[in-house]
Amino acid sequence: MSATAPPRPLLAATDLTKHFTVGKTFWPGSGRTLRAVEDVSLEVFPGETLGLVGESGSGKSTLGRCLTRLYTLTAGRLLFDGRDISAAKERALKPVRLNMQMIFQDPSASLNPRRRVRDIVGDVLHVHKIRPAAAIEDRLAELMGLVGLGGDYLDRYPHEFSGGQRQRIGIARALAVEPKLIVADEPVSALDVSVQAQIVNLFNELQERLHLTYVFIAHDLAVVRQVSTRVAVMYLGSIVETGETDALYSRPAHPYTEALLSAIPQPGRRARGNRILLEGELPSPLDPPRGCKFSTRCRYAQARCRTDRPAPTAIAGGSRTVACHFPLVAGA
Amino acid sequence: MADTSTSSPAVPGGIAAGERASRRARRGQSPWVRAWLILRRDRAAILAAIVLVIIVVASLLAPLYAAHVSRTDPFRSNLSGSITIDGQSVAIMQSSTQGLGLGVVPIGPTWRAQYLLGADAQGRDVAARLLYGGRNSLLIAGASTLICLVLAALVGTCAGFFGGATDMVLSRLLDVLWAFPVYLLAISLSIVLISQGITIGPVEIKSGSLLLPIGIIGIIYVPYIARPVRGRVLALRGSEFVLAARGLGIPRWRILRKDILPNVATTLIVYIPLMMALNIVTESALSFLSIGVQAPDASWGTIMQDGQTLLYTRPVVALAPGLAVVATVLALNVLGDGVRDALDPRTKLR
């Protein structure tokens, strides 16, 4: 769509869709379709950090796992570095896996409790023979150094570390293959606030030092603002708005973004002063609204919103997209 | 190359160093060692383990007991024999008007080396038979537990890991097995197999063989273990650390070996004492019904059956194996609880 942009996107998704079938029984055709991710198109450019925000259940994590092809896609196209990986089999995916890594939310669940850090981080070096056996020890020490842990922690088990340290181990594991792109799925939301800041700083440092590209998934808008160069806002499996971080935070174009931003607590502002309270609940992805997905809770919604689903449209000279019939920022 | 980050303060050392566990060993404490340390502090579990060791050792020493202490053959009836107590000769089968017998009652507990717990209706030394019975009961329980766990691990892991049609077929098979009440299934199998024996290809298992009760008890409880194993494998397969391994392009079989099986092992280990306990009870029940261990072999169940007719005159004959079963099962359950608590990696060292 926006192939006119000069740099080639590292990762490009077009109409990416992921459905799950729930409640399936013996009979074919039984079960209901859960539309976790629907028609998501986004591009990630080399060197940037794309923040992906949305409330719980909006499909952020599913999208992240689709982007890294941990899940098979129901529909849509996914290009990594220009190569179509939408339907690639595991064997064909291997080179892609070495360039694209994932960091998980819960650092205690993402490390096998029965393996030493040495094996957790170093396994992939052996399996794919990324380094000669003699060089693996040095590489492990180097990786531990990169994430700010000492090499003498290598023989410990995950339960002997704090949450922040475990997340550092998870990062070291992802870095072991020298990836270009890292999809971080809420990497700091399970951590204490003080530790969050350290991990966020680590992300920034590593990006500079290793020229990484990030997709940073979070529900904490303040954290996303701190790390992202661009932000995509998700609602009920769809991306409602994308844009440069500063532009999007200062002038949200989608009513949902506006409501989301108004919920950020700010020092000095009176509680609930100009906060937009969303009514109702997040609709079920088993039965999403027919028109605009946000129409059931949008304070600007009109008749058209309930029948036609708006497609993402470029606004603000092409630097932003918004999926809304009545965007809050003037059109292209 | 170990230059740590400049903007983020160096946290690494401080927090972990505070943990008692890491101070103890620089080389990291494996979850297995950790489980052992927790178990070692569990007094009830250790006591239970000691009781079990005593029971097992005593059973193993049965031939020595029979040869040197009771000096009788516990497998041959001794209806006309007599022993010497305080210089007087006492018949083992005494004529009596008590009870329902035909005027003959076996000797009661002598509390001496010979016929410590008295004799059964065949005039055999109950104490010696109790020890021999323990051998069979423990052997059957142990071997059938092993069979059960191996089968359940195989079936459960395949069903959970491969999913799809494999899971479908295996799960339905388990359901079929599950649908039978355990004892009904065991009794049906026993009656068919033990009356005729079984021939599988070149292998012929005679009707009196211990392999039959072992096999039957091993199979009937498979669904009870295979289901939780399957559930555990399913959970592990979707866990973040398995996703991470897949994301690294680690081959499937290696994920199974390194990430899934070691974590399934704990589930299986937790079941060992509990299944042992269950199997001892099942074995006793089958033997009591004469469809387990076959005469003249003894097991706790067969001794109970022997004691059944003597319940009014010589209750010890039935009570002794009953108490042996209760003690063993209780000890196994206490030990099982301790093992379960110790193996949960999230249990804290107290």
Image (tube, helix red, strand yellow):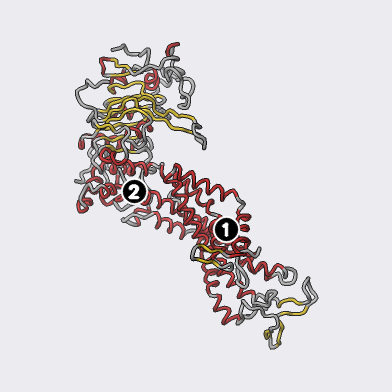
Q: Is residue B38 left or right of residue B11?
A: right
Q: Which residue is mark 2?
A: B16
Is any part of residue B350 visible from this angle?
A: no
Drawn side of residue A296 relative to residue B217, left or right: left
Asked if B136 appears above or below A315 in the picture, the reply is below
Q: How far is mark 2 from mark 1, CA to CA? A: 42 Å
In the orientation shown, which residue stands out farthest toward the right?
B97
Residue A243 is at least partly visible in this image? yes
Query: Label 2 sits on what residue type?
Result: Ala
In the rendered image, residue B300, in percent from the top left (x then y), is placed at 61, 67
Q: Residue at x 21, y 34 (%)?
A: A211
Task: Say if B199 sits above or below A240 in the image.
Answer: below
Please identify the quadrant where the N terminus of chain A is shown: top left
Estimate the x, y position of residue A95 in percent, counting from the top left: 25, 40
Of residue A169 and residue A215, the one placed in the foreground of this image is A215
On-image quarter of the C terminus of chain A: top left
| Residue at horizontal 58 percent and vertical 65 percent from the top | B197
The residue where tag 1 is placed is B278
Counting residues from the start of the chain, the first of labels 2 and 1 encountered is 2
**Number of marks drawn:** 2
What is the chain letter for disc 1? B
Residue A213 point in image, percent of width and height: 25, 32
Q: Residues within 10 Å of mark 2 (few under 14, many from 20)?
A: some
| Chain letter, disc 2 residue | B
Identify the element where label 1 is drawn.
Answer: helix
